[in-house]
Image: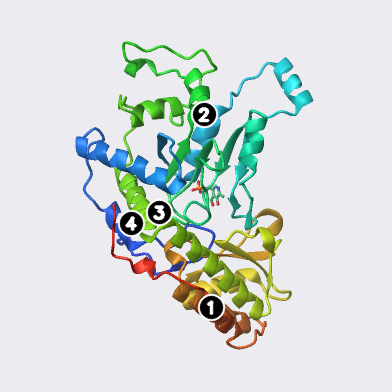
């Protein structure tokens, strides 16, 4: 590359795809706070606050509730690599296959690729009956769908900031209970250079990752503050602010806001003559799949939405590629005015592409849902921070 490289100046966009979504300015402000050393008492106090904040969001008493640095996949990998032993004797594999008894049940609460939500309220009890660990990927749903971790007997959960928590990608809040701690502790092997004098290694199979080793991360986030990695301080500030914003609004209000937006968006799209994707009884409230009408090129619509209106909506992958758009109404973006802009822009764009929706029908239907909603909290502008 030659010539002058200018300063970063990203175009203004309204990100209404399946994530990332437009970041809350309060979170961007938190990202610019001065860095501190990770063992500075002021910083470890922030770490403890983050643990407390995410316990509230996850509705759990789990002590081990903290951030894994990296995008949401980091949290997923840390939990899975620490729970699942990767080397099995063949006879164990055979026995496992015969019995069809998994050790860990891995399930996604809201699958953004299909826009479907998995009901979870009964799964935990089933897992307990069969002594199976239940792990839930809540990347796209924490703050957007109910997830009472303790009440639903979920053993481990991970999430990301860039969806219903209104933050940037790059930090994964996780939580897990004593059942997980017992498994992980048996596999604990602290690396030689930082072993404390009283260290006793677990007798289980060592965890096959250094960075995502939950046993070492627990020592790092726990009272011993055993060094592991340099905490991504700016991302911790962001995660701190993300949780505060949801809790200041009130978790229930926040969930209701996502439900109302989903109802308004689906009403608007249907009134425009568009067909929604998938079984609507199991639709997740924060991402909506829309079937691309016959004769319309989905990518042209996405390009024009971006060029003419600055609005990003999502395409799809795999078997759904070219068949559906995915529209996200998550976190900071999940507000009436954005949704109405999106519907109006989509109507105009579709007209350019040969699909004629009844003029104004989408916006009118969505507005009617908002008007009928018992309470749509004006909480996104809430100035009260009660923590
Ligand atoms: C349900 C779900 N799980 C996991 C991921 C992966 O998250 P990340 O890209 O932050 O690693 C995504 C991202 O879109 C997601 O929607």
Rendering coords of residue 374 (x, y %) = 50, 73
Q: CA–CA distance between discs 2 and 3?
A: 28 Å
Q: Quadrant of the N terminus?
A: bottom left
**Label 4 element class:** helix
Q: Are marks 1 and 2 in contact (CB under 8 Å)?
A: no
Rendering coords of residue 156 (x, y %) = 52, 37
| Up/down of 183 relative to 353, above or below | above
**Disc 4 designates what residue?**
27
> CB of residue at label 2: within 8 Å of ligand 1?
no
What's the residue at 53%, 74% (across, down)? 305
Q: Nearer the viewer, mark 4 or mark 1?
A: 1
Sequence order check: which comes first, mark 4 or mark 1?
Answer: 4
Q: Nearer the viewer, residue 295 or 222?
A: 222
Tell whether 377 sits left or right of 46. Answer: right
Q: Nearer the viewer, residue 198 or 126?
A: 126
Sequence order check: which comes first, mark 2 or mark 4?
Answer: 4
What's the residue at 53%, 63% (across, down)? 17
**Which disc is residue 372 wearing?**
1
**Disc 3 designates what residue?**
168
Rendering coords of residue 228 (x, y %) = 35, 28
Q: CA–CA distance between discs 4 and 1?
A: 31 Å
Q: Nearer the viewer, mark 1 or mark 3?
A: 1
What's the residue at 44%, 13% (across, down)? 201
Q: Are marks 4 and 1 in contact (CB under 8 Å)?
A: no
Q: Nearer the viewer, residue 154 or 170?
A: 154
**Label 1 element class:** helix
Sequence order check: which comes first, mark 1 or mark 3?
Answer: 3
Rendering coords of residue 307 (x, y %) = 49, 74
């Amino acid at each position: 590359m030659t010539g002058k490289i200018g300063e970063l100046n990203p175009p203004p966009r309204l990100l209404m795809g399946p994530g990332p979504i437009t970041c809350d300015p309060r979170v961007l402000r938190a990202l610019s706070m001065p860095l501190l050393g990770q063992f500075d008492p002021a910083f470890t106090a922030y770490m403890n606050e983050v643990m407390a904040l995410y316990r509230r969001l996850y509705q759990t008493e789990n002590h081990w509730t903290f951030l894994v640095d990296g995008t949401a996949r980091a949290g997923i990998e840390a939990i899975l690599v620490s729970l699942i032993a990767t080397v099995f004797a063949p006879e164990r594999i055979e026995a496992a296959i015969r019995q069809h008894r998994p050790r860990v049940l891995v399930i996604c609460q809201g699958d953004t690729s299909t826009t479907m939500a998995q009901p979870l309220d009964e799964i935990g009890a089933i897992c307990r009956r069969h002594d199976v660990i239940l792990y839930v990927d809540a990347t796209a749903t924490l703050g957007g769908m109910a997830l009472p971790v303790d009440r639903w007997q979920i053993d481990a959960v991970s999430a990301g900031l860039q969806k219903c928590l209104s933050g940037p990608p790059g930090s994964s809040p996780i939580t897990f209970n004593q059942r997980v701690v017992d498994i992980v502790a048996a596999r604990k092997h602290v690396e030689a250079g930082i072993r404390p004098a009283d260290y006793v290694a677990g007798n289980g199979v060592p965890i096959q990752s250094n960075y995502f080793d939950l046993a070492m991360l627990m020592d790092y986030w726990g009272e011993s503050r055993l060094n592991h990695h340099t905490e991504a301080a700016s991302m911790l500030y962001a995660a701190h602010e993300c949780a505060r914003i949801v809790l200041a609004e009130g978790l229930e209000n926040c969930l209701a806001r996502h439900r109302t937006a989903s109802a308004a968006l689906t009403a608007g799209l249907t009134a425009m003559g568009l067909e929604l994707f998938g079984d609507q009884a199991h639709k997740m409230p924060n991402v909506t799949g829309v079937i691309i009408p016959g004769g319309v090129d989905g990518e042209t619509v996405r390009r024009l939405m971006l060029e003419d209106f600055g609005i990003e909506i999502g395409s799809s992958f795999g078997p759904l590629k070219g068949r559906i758009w995915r529209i996200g109404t998550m976190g900071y973006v999940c507000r009436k005015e954005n949704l109405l802009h999106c519907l109006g822009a989509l109507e105009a764009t579709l007209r350019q592409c040969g699909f004629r929706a009844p003029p104004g029908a989408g916006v009118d239907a969505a507005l009617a849902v908002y008007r009928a909603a018992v309470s749509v909290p004006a909480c996104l502008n809430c100035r009260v921070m009660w923590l």
